[in-house]
Image (spheres, grey):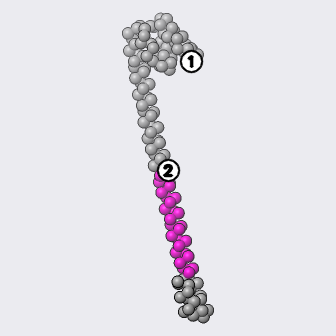
């Protein structure tokens, strides 16, 4: 009955439940093994194959869950990357707008000085 040692506690709980054992959640691993062996439905070959199937199914679910988590992690990372790119683009756009505004303010100031009669001498000083 060494095959019963191949599964996890959860695998043995599923198997015991399928064999009609009640209250499997409160049983320890060795108690689950005993309950399975002492079950009136116990057939060694059937139980061996059944446990293999249960283990394979659990592993398949674990692989699917892992793949799903990886997919979600990739989606999350991609979404964060796009958000960061958008934030950087916005920051650069704002910087460019501020630069244009400063240039316009500078040109406006030059025109004001010229109109106030500051002459060409003051304009050359500002440009230098």
- Above or below residue 90? Residue 2 is above
Question: Is residue 7 visible in the rendered structure shown here?
Answer: yes
Number of marks in picture: 2
Query: Range of the magenta residues?
Result: 79-106
Question: Is residue 20 visible in the rendered structure shown here?
Answer: no
Residue at 44 percent across and 25 percent down: it is 58
Whether 19 is among the magenta residues is no
Image quadrant containing the N terminus:
top left
Residue 80 - label: 2
Whether 99 is among the magenta residues is yes
Picture coordinates of residue 84, whole percent (x, y)? 50, 55
Picture coordinates of residue 113, whole percent (x, y)? 59, 89
Query: Residue 108 sits in which quadrant?
Result: bottom right
Picture coordinates of residue 91, whole percent (x, y)? 53, 63
Of 59 and 121, which appears nearest the observer? 121
Q: Secondary structure under badge 2? A: helix
Mark 2 or mark 1: which comes first in sequence?
1
Residue 54 - label: none
Residue picked out by circle 1: 25
Query: Residue 107 sits in which quadrant?
Result: bottom right
Picture coordinates of residue 9, whole percent (x, y)? 50, 18
- Above or below residue 121? Residue 81 is above
- Label 2 to label 1, Cα distance in Å? 41 Å
């Amino acid at each position: 009955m060494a095959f019963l040692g191949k599964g996890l506690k959860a695998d043995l709980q599923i198997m015991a439940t399928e064999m009609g054992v009640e209250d499997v959640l409160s049983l320890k691993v060795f108690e689950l093994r005993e309950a399975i062996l002492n079950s009136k439905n116990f057939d060694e070959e059937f139980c061996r194959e059944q446990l293999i199937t249960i283990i394979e199914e659990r592993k398949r679910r674990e692989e699917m869950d892992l793949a799903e988590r990886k997919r979600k992690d990739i989606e999350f990372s991609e979404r964060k990357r796009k958000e960061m790119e958008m934030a950087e683009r916005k920051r650069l756009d704002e910087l460019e707008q501020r630069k244009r505004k400063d240039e316009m303010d500078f040109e406006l100031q030059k025109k004001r000085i010229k109109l106030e009669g500051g002459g060409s001498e003051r304009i050359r000083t500002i440009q230098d």
